[in-house]
Amino acid sequence: GSVFSHVVQAPEDPILGVTVAYNKDPSPVKLNLGVGAYRTEEGKPLVLNVVRHAEQQLVNDRSRVKEYLPIVGLADFNKLSAKLILGADSPAIRENRVTTVQCLSGTGSLRVGGEFLARHYHERSIYIPLPTWGNHPKVFTLAGLSVKTYRYYDPKTRGLDFQGLLEDLGSAPSGAVVLLHACAHNPTGVDPTPQQWEQIRQLMRSKALLPFFDSAYQGFASGSLDTDAQSVRMFVADGGECLVAQSYAKNMGLYGERVGALSIVCRAADVASRVESQLKLVIRPMYSNPPIHGASIVATILKDRNLFHEWTIELKAMAERIISMRKQLFDALRTRGTPGDWSHIIKQIGMFTFTGLNKEQVAFMTKEYHIYMTSDGRISMAGLSSRTVPHLADAIHAAVT
Ligand code: PMP
């Protein structure tokens, strides 16, 4: 017998498992709206032209070698990533108060940040929104933090539970870490308004709560890199400290390249430098140093004026296609006279719509219409096209009537 024969079958990941089920379905009309990956109008994955151009440059440069990167990753990539999220004119960057390390996409950045906090920060609690991306509680628990939740979404209004949020953060222990989605909250598509962000900032600073931003969708929500970074910049502008995890999976379409960054904004340059030395001690035994290819693509694009401009145009086009899918789905439901208020489909932003459909309705749509989505009723708008909107609208209509 095997020494592993006692090992029990683990359940599929609730998000990635949707794709596993989708792949097994032979139906020609099947539709995968589970995983958050951008698709073209033709339903195909997209490699941005600007990424192809950058890769071409990299291939043509015969001086490039495949040596190890430093533990903290590619220096240019780190500098330019901080600039992208904090703004070109950020005083924190100018004053050398920011340390940035290249990590394995957004997930790896959250994990490294979490482990650093567990080792060196005085408060173990991290508050995450309810609901949030399903990986958050697992990442932070394994990092050694104690995960608590704060109210975020109100199913009755399908909007922000702002009162609940203020109450829960108001009663969190002083110094607690608070995970904030920088924009395009996953899975709800509901973000605070700028005024609400300002109130959150004041409350958090008054209680010395430490912001940990998860920025997985910069540019994807509004189509503008600067607009989608406003929440983070608001917290950095007050001179206070925070952590930011960035991912280039969605906004550069670099999903499988696993390229991201963790920045820690500190009060002073000497602190930032000591913090970086400790981040290296977190990273070295975990994966030694990060991969070179994806970070080189990003750095090539961010440092070249023309490539950067080309990127912003392609990024805007992706964001606009998603926004147009929202309008088309909303109109299709209205045309069918589907009962209920579906205006949240056009109010929510980012990759996902939190439909309000329950587990039974989702199961019905999968069984009868071969539409695959997470059981919480979240659909990836980026997986839809003009061709597939009618099929989805038919399914939703049938599920609620
Ligand atoms: N945070 C949020 C909110 C996300 O939605 C995602 C991607 N689904 C991530 C982090 C991390 O993604 P990745 O590790 O692929 O960058």
Image (cartoon, grey):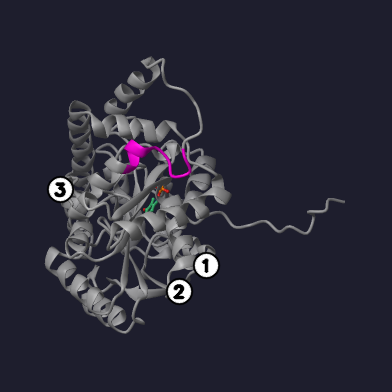
Q: CA distance from mark 2 to mark 3?
A: 33 Å
The mark nearer the N terminus, 1 or 3, is 3
Amino acid tagged 2 = Arg
- 306 inside magenta stretch: no
Which SS class for mark 3? loop
The mark nearer the N terminus, 2 or 3, is 3
In the rendered image, residue 185, in percent from the top left (x then y), is placed at: 29, 59
**Compared to 107, does 68 lie above or below?**
above
Which SS class for mark 1? loop
Magenta-colored span = 70-78
Amino acid tagged 3 = Asp
Residue tagged 2? 124
Circle number at residue 89: 3
Left or right of 205 in this view: 74 = right
Q: CA distance from mark 1 to mark 3?
A: 35 Å
Residue tagged 1? 144
Which SS class for mark 2? loop
Amino acid tagged 1 = Gly
